[in-house]
Each structure stands twice: as structure tokens, then as C-alpha cells.
Image: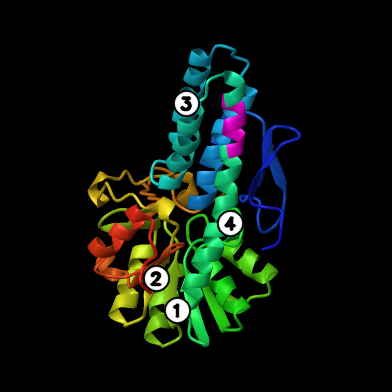
Amino acid sequence: MPDPYTIAWDAETESIVYIDQTLLPGRYEQMRCTTVEDLARAIRRLEVRGAPALGIAGAMGVALAAVRSTETDLGRFLGEIRRAADLLKSTRPTAVNLAWGIDRVARKVAMAASVAEAKAIAVAEANAVAEEDELTCRRLGAFGEELFPAECTVLTHCNAGALACRCWGTALGMIRSAVAAGKNVRVIACETRPLNQGSRLTCWELARDKIDVTLIPDSSAAYLMRKGKIDLVIVGADRITRDAVFNKIGTYMHAVSAHHHGIPFYVAAPVSTFDLARTEKDITVEERDRAELAYCGERMLAPDGVNVLNYAFDATPLDLVDAIITEIGVLRPPYAESFRLVGKGEGAQR
């Protein structure tokens, strides 16, 4: 997807500019955050979403708190930064990149010798996080495109594209890289209920790039696998623990179906999404508002008083994952061995 970036730091106004993803595909509009509270609200409302983009948002949120502070005492200034960090971390509990981006910048800020130095460090580090994300996605895409046959149909779920990153994308970055390499790739995009990130965002991105995409209801994916219409499945990730991949709700059922039908199931994620100190049972899965299921705009879809269980994510056991594609290479089972490379930052065996 061409510029502008999904999220960026505006040096002239010392603010954050981002694409409001809740308005797509009907309207493309850039918004501006001038306070940490603005950014927290944008993250909660999913105006900014996607694991790598949240990492950038978290990093830039710390920079925003720093440059907007009027505090001159370094100790009190750092207290303001900690409070801003806590506010931002509370917005999305499951995606690990948000806290990763926040902590990365906050650690650098804490080493400053003055408030002025802390502000400069915060902005520089936040921009470094964003620039590294683009390079990461390009490297990940280059590793991943080698897994594509010369001609294939790929199923993807939710949106792990340019809108979920600075640009290019993870799962969709692999697809873009494969297409750029001359491969004939057709994409089947699940709608991704209840907020339709697949139909609204993935289809919008791919159509803009003139990549062949077909939209399906989430519930038809297994049937298409059975009919031989899908060659491989590629999804992104919001957190990868020692035993599971956390991604948009619905991912697990696609993994089970792919495993049953002998279809490769791949996860595309940067190393920053790994949380190898934890297991599935340690992670809080975000539950979202009842209205997302009970209403479509103003139209009521469920009677008042009916309970709703609206998990935003699910966990897919690693024994259903054929490979995890990262910027350091392609990780394959046994993952206990492959994950050692993540800690070392070494390239994985393809």
C-alpha cells in the first residue's frame, strides 16, 4: 500500500498522525493525536490497530507525553512518563507489541540526564521503532515469499497488512513480496466478524494494490478447504507465547481445519511479538463490548437482555502451526529449539 504511513510522527507539530481505520473502506481520513489521552482513546476504539502498529503507537505515545510535558524537574517528568505509559498499556491487554514499544522508549528516556535530553531521546527512539518496523516487514516478506508456490490461493484472516504496521505488512507483506517476485497469488479474505477487519481493511488494501482478492464469510473457510480451493493459510499474530499463537478470534478454527485437510498453516510475526517468558494460561484475552455483536450500526441484531461473549482473540496451539515467519528467518518445529534463535537474534533455518 502506498504512503502515507499508517502511523507517523509529525515533527513540525509534535503530534501523531494516523489513518482512522474505523472509517474504511467508505472513507479514508487521517487523524491527529496531540495528547496521550487522544491516543489512548484511538487505540481503544481501534482507530489504530494491528500488533506492529500498536508497538509504534506505544512508542510514539511516550514521545508525545514527553514533548507535551511542561515539567522541568527530571524526577517529576519521569513520573509523568510512567503514568502515561500505564494509561496506554491499559488500552489493549492481549497484544504484546503495545507494551513492548512503550517500554522500549520509556527505558531510554529513564537514562536521560535532563528533561531536554529525555524529550529528544523519546522522539528519536519512537521514530527508530517506526523505521525498523518497515525494514522488519520487508525482511519478513522476503523470507515468507519463498514458501509460496508459483501459483496458489491463500486464505488470510483479519488484517495483518500495511494498516497493521507502518507499511507493507506481515501476512500481507508476504503476499505482496510473493506478487512482486512474479508469483500468481490469489487471496481469499475472511470477513473477520464482528468488526469485519478482513472485509473492510484487508480487501481495501489488496484491491488498492490490484492483488486478486475474494471475500468470504468466516464460516465458509473449512468448506473451501475441503473442496480444494485453498493451498495455504497465512495469518498474523498479536502475541506468541511458548505454547500458543494469539491472534484475532477465529484463527484457531482455521488452524484446526487446515490441519485436518493437510493445508500448511503459517504465522507471520516480527520478533517483537514473541513473549517467550509466558504461556497461554498467563495471558489475559481481551473481551470487547456487547454492542459489537448485538448491533450493526443502529440496527439491532440480538434482543436486549441476551448475554454476549465477545472475545477479541483466541489462542492456537503451536502443534497446529507449520511455520512462523519472522525477520530473522522461518521458524519451524520443534519450536522449543527454534525459539532459542529468537532470544539470540540469529537467523533461523529455512
Give how far apart the Cα atoms at labels 3 and 2 are. Answer: 38 Å
Disc 3, SS: helix
Tell me which numbered mark, 2 or 4, is placed earlier along the sequence.
4
Return the x and y of residue 289 as percentages of the image width and height.
45, 43
The amino acid type of the residue labelled 1 equals Leu
Q: Nearer the viewer, mark 1 or mark 2?
A: 1
Q: What stretch is highlighted in magenta?
A: 118-124
Magenta portion: prevailing SS class = helix
Give how far apart the Cα atoms at labels 3 and 1 are. Answer: 42 Å
Badge 1: how crowded within 10 Å, few (<14), some, or many (20+)? some
Give how far apart the Cα atoms at labels 4 and 3 are. Answer: 26 Å
Return the x and y of residue 282 as percentages of the image width and height.
25, 44
Image mark count:
4
Magenta includes 81? no
If the image is split into quadrants, where does the N terminus sit?
Answer: bottom right
Tell me which numbered mark, 3 or 1, is placed earlier along the sequence.
3
Q: Residue 147 carries which label?
A: 1
Q: Mark 3 points at which residue?
A: 110
Instruction: Tell me the residue at 56%/77% (across/down).
Output: 178
Tell me which numbered mark, 1 or 2, is placed earlier along the sequence.
1
Q: Which of marks 4 and 3 is in front?
A: 3
Q: Mark 2 points at which residue?
A: 266
